[in-house]
Each structure stands twice: as structure tokens, then as C-alpha cells.
Amino acid sequence: MRFLSVLKAMARHSVRDMMNLFFNLFFPLVTLLIFGYVFSGIYSQSSLNVGFYGQKLPMVSGIKYIEYPTLSQLKDAVNSQKIDLGVTLEGTSLFAYINPANIQSSNYYSSIVKSIADEINKSKGINNVIGVERNDISFTGKHLDYLDNLIPGILALSIFSAGIFSITASLAHFRDKKVIKRFWTTPLAKWEFYSAFISEKMVESFLSIILLFVAAMIFFRPPYSIDLVRFTITVLAGTFGMMGVGMAILLISPNARVASEISSVLYTVIMFFSGVYFPLDLLPKFLQYIAYGLPLTYLVMAMKSAMGIAPMSDLFFYLTIGIMFFGSVLVLLGFSRIFKVE
Amino acid sequence: MKRVFAIFKALIVSSIRSPSVIFWNIFFPVILLLILASIFSNIGKEVSFRVNLVDESTTFKNTNMDFASYISEAFKEMSTGKNAVITLESSTTQNFLNESLEKLKSGKIDAVIVIPPLFNTQIYAAVVQQKGGFNLFSKPKIEVYTLENSQTSDLAFTIISSVLESFNLKILQNSGTLSDFVSPKTEYVSKNGQNFSYIDFIVPGILVMAVMTVSIFGITDDLLVQREKKVLRKLFVAPLNKGEYFWAMILSNLAIEIVQIIILLILGLYLGAHFGLGILAILYILFAIVTTLPIGFFIASFSKTSDAGNALANIFNFLFMFLGGLFFPITGVPLAVQIVAYIIPTTYLANGLRSAMGVMSSPTPMYLNILVPLIWAIVMVIYSAKVFKWEV
């Protein structure tokens, strides 16, 4: 009964705390929408604007040619991003002019230039002797783009921040404002307070993830095949696991402000190394070692598997969840003993 | 002037003593520059791909026409040594092919190369028919299986294609048709004619982000936290006016910005960035500082509490950073996002700074790169001066 009263009080406090609502709901939503629109634009251009100078070039699918009167004007257009790439045919060399700012697309641009060269060679009766046929295999059997991979990462980041900040901001705030100390003067047992606090934060995290997910489905319609059991377990165990990390931060911080600052720094730094924005295989080796030591990396993997876009064996999935869950139980239990309310 | 200097000194000391100010203003831009530079300059280098090769060829085995074995050997060579580009497993069985495709599907490997049974015969026939100018036999085709939507798999395919391309060139050379063969050559275009890389693009972007962050978080914090803690009220009881505090605050943020700019420029040069630091570039950096400083004042003017100010600062920071094209060019985004991108000042500041530093031509006219940030700054200063409450 007392557990329920504390739970209700915590829920009310969370709803009334505008900053809590802002950072748990509004900010992740804005992040999702901005990243969604920016990255879907960068990676899913339907047609490329290709400038050329001199000799007319054969048409290949997915491009639109724009003619330039001089080579320097063509290069300038590439340099100032007016066109996606420039091409000129000089003798037997098909020069491709690429702006390195478009580094994410340079492979795609190179493949377009190769297709143009192949068409020119074909028209001369010269064909590559060995043909290369590319067959894409999809884990899901569905076409996925960069954004479809990014969304589970953003959800995992939200779980990460909700878990950590619930301890380093909320619990620390209760401690600094002497709220917990006052609770201890009542007949409330410690376990009732902590379990109500953790339960409320779990529900809050779950609701915010659901809201983000619904927003992602409405705005971007990603083709996920959700495994509801895995999804629920990931959100709950993830939030719980990150609370353990938050508790560890809180123990080394003198007050809520410092704990919050350390969490923000940690959040900002590790979000780049956890496979949310860039595949881990593309990181330099030493960063890969760091990445595989971070809990967020495994949370991202588990979330992608729960959404059916990346493989993760049952053994690996439940091992990850188990470590996150039981590891945090130990951390929270252990630390709650040494956590000083005053 | 003496009082301005005293407050300036106090604010600087307070900043130096604050680990969060040091982290967000100095370390964070440095870390971000290092991360982005190491990730994007690493693409295609130092990366090792896991490739399985299935050689099903059965004809001309162990003869000098065993082209399949030449190809296998080339890939094996790439998998040996300290800087091996690929990790290779190869076999000839159908079972191995099935296993490889399963591994690819589960992301354990990045590509599977399949050389077909009649490969060697088909090559021989293709060379003969190319020389004879007829087209009777089907051409040899190597199948490369990749994982859809995997950047690592995409890069593995690029490398595999380039190896097979070199075989094509060799065969064409031997058949005497290479002289007319058109091959692509890639050139990265820069404004100053030097080798241009992603790091050149990112340094001005990080500079704009850094000066903007100081203003957005530094000034908002200086005004709102101090107001909330009643420090401002106490200060104004002393013989100090608001103007003096304002200028001291501006100068202290300016000092932090100058330090961070110097550190970032040195780091950029160390990482191999090419940029010019002529008078135009220095003037434009100063212009960027001056026009971003009012953002913090603007946010503070319509925030009642420091928490609300912090929330707004995060939103502004995020919008200005990612929609301003500071790290990646904003191309192909939906119209609504493009409209926002072309309204906010950071788009023009990044374009203007890249152009002034000789990195690339600005996609927007230079007069807009000056006018738009200037209008933002003037409007923000006028609004903030009218609305901001020094005491609550």
C-alpha cells in the first residue's frame, strides 16, 4: 500500500516536472525528427545532379545531367555543392569530380561513374570480359535504409539517458533537497521507496520509448518486424541496467549538479562509439575496442534485434539482457547500502 | 573600465574553476573533431572485411588458363600480412556456399564471392569472341553476395570490384583492346587546388559550433544562473551597472572563444587539414563570434528559469548544429527542413567560413553569408535588450 502511494507520488512529481518531460520526451522526439529528416535526405536522394563538360555522355538510371560551358565552372559547381558530382571525358579517362564533404555518398558516386564508363565502353563495342553481379541479401527480406538502422539506435540512446538521468538527476535531486531524509523519518521501508522509484522510472522510460516509436512509425514508416517480447525486455532491462551505471556515477559525485554533468559528458561522448550513427566496423581499431566495452553498444544491438533488422542469437540476446539485469541488481543493491542520503 | 575588468577576471576564474565549462567549451569540440576525423578519414583504410570465396570452377584446372585460381590467389594475398585488407575463407563446395550465405545473412561476414563452374572456359570464349567481333557465348560472371544496407558490405564490394576490374584490364590488355577502354578516375575538388579531404570541411564547421556553444550555454548560464542565485542583484547593489556586467560577460566569453579557436586550428593542422588563415578568414571568424554572441542573450531573455534556459539552449544548439550543415552537407532534405536550414544563421556562417578559409566555394552568395547572420544578431540584440529582466 505504501509502495503504491510512493509510486503515485513519484508519477505525479515526474508529470509536473517540466524539465523531466522535456528531456525524456520532447528532446528525444526533436532529435528523432531532425536526424530522421536530415539523414533520410542525405542517404536517400532519388536522383543525382551530375554536371558535365565537353562531350555528351550516355544516360544511366538515377541521374540528371547538367551541362557546363567550362571545366572550371563545373569544378566550382561541385565545390559549392550546386551539383552532386561532375564528370568529363578526356581521351580514355572519365574524370569524376567529387566534393569530399559528401564522404558518406562517395561510394555511391563512384558506382555511378563506373556505370557511365561501362556504357561508353559498351557503345565502343568493348565490354568487360568478367562481369560482376551484385546480389544483396537482406536479413529481414525487406529493403532497409540508413534511417531504419538509426531509429533503434536513437531509441537505445533514449533508454540510456532515461536510465542514467533518472538516478543522477532525479534521485540525486531528492537526496540534495533532503527529500529522502524526510522519507526515512516516516515508517516507510527503504525497499518500498527504492522499488517505487525504480518502478516509476521504468514505466516512464517505457512510455517515452513507445511514444518515440509511434512518432517514428508515423513520420518515417520504417518496415520493422517487432518482436514484442524482445522489445519489452530490452526496454526494461536496458533502463534497469543504465540505472546501475547512473548509481555508479552518483556515488562518485558530490552533488546532483556534478552527477548530471558527468552523465551529460558520458552520454555525449559514448553515443558516437556505440554503433548508433556509424557501423562499429568502420571505426578505427582502437575505438572498436572501446566500443565493445560500452553497455550502450549492446543495448543498440539488442534493440535492432528486437525490431527485426539485425540478427542476434537467442543465447547472445538473453546473455546481454541477463548481464544488464542481474548486473544492475547487484550494483543497485550494493550501492544502496553505501549510498549516503546525507 | 576597472570594474569591467574586475568582473571579467571573476568570470574567467569562475569558468576555469568549472570543469563543465572547460569540458563543453574546450574538450568537447576537440573530442568531436577527433572522433569525426578518425571515423571519416578511416573509411576504406585500416578496415578489414570478412570475405568468403567459393570457387566452383571445374574446367582448365591447374593449367595456365585457370583464371579462377589467379583470382583466388589475388584475394588470398590481400588476406595475408600485417595490414591485411580482408579475412578470407575459401572452399569449393556447395555446402560451404550455403554456410557462407547464412553467415552473411547473420552479419558474421561482409561478402561472398562465387566463381561459377565454367568460368575459365567462358573467359577463353569471351576473349576469342571479343577479338573476332562476334557474340555467341555468354560472358563469365562472378557473383558477389553482399548484405543489404550494410556500409561495411558496400565497402567490401567496392574493394572486390576493383580487384576484378584489374583482372579485366589485364585481359583487355592481352587481347589488344585496352587502348580504347575508358576507365574512371576520381578527383576531389577543392577551392584552393590542394588535396581536399573531409577534415578540411569539418574544421570550419566545428569552429562555428564551438563559438556558438560558448554563447548558447555560456551566456545563458552567466545570466540565468547568476540571476536565479541572486548574484546579479547583489552585484548591482555595488557600484556596478548592468552595462559594465554585460561587457565583462561578453569579454570573458570572447576570451574562452579565442582560446578554443586557437586550440581547434592547431588540432586541425595537426590532423592534416588544409585551410587558409588570411585576413579574410580571421575577419570572418571574428564576425562569426560577434554574430553568435547574442544567441545566448536572446535565449536568456525569454527564459524565466535557468532550467527553462537550459532546455531552450539544447534545442537551439541541436537545431543550429545539425540543420546548419556544420558536419555534413544538407542536401536532398525535405523542403520544410531546407527552409529551416536556409533561415538559421549557422548555415550561412559555415558556408562563409569555409569560403573565407579557402576550403570550398560557398553554395550561398557571400553577401547573404554576411547579411543573414547580421540580421539575426541585430534582431536578437534589440529583442533581448528590451525584454531581458536583470532581476526576478
Image: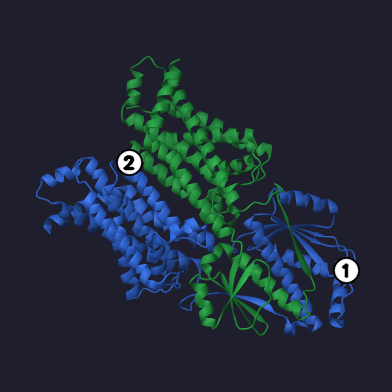
Chain colours: A green, B blue
Q: Amino acid at mark 2?
A: Asp
Q: Nearer the viewer, mark 1 or mark 2?
A: 2
Q: Is residue A271 above or below residue B253?
A: above
Q: Amino acid at mark 1?
A: Asn
What residue appears at the point 41 percent right and 44 percent down from the top-left corner? A264
Q: Which residue is mark 2?
A: B307
Left or right: A35 with respect to A260?
right
Please state the horizontal and vertical placement of residue B39, each as a whole percent of the image. Answer: 53, 59
Classify the position of the C terminus of chain B by image quarter: top left
Q: Which residue is mark 1?
A: B62
Query: Looking at the image, how many numbered discs can be counted on the residues?
Result: 2
Please state the horizontal and vertical placement of residue B297, each as a whole percent of the image. Answer: 27, 52
In-front residue for pair B115/B280: B280
Residue B256 in view of the camera: no
In-front residue for pair B135/A48: A48
Badge 1 or badge 2: first in the primary sequence:
1
Secondary structure at numbered mark 2: helix
Q: Is residue A332 above or below residue A309?
A: above
In-front residue for pair A239/A102: A102
Left or right: A87 with respect to A201?
right
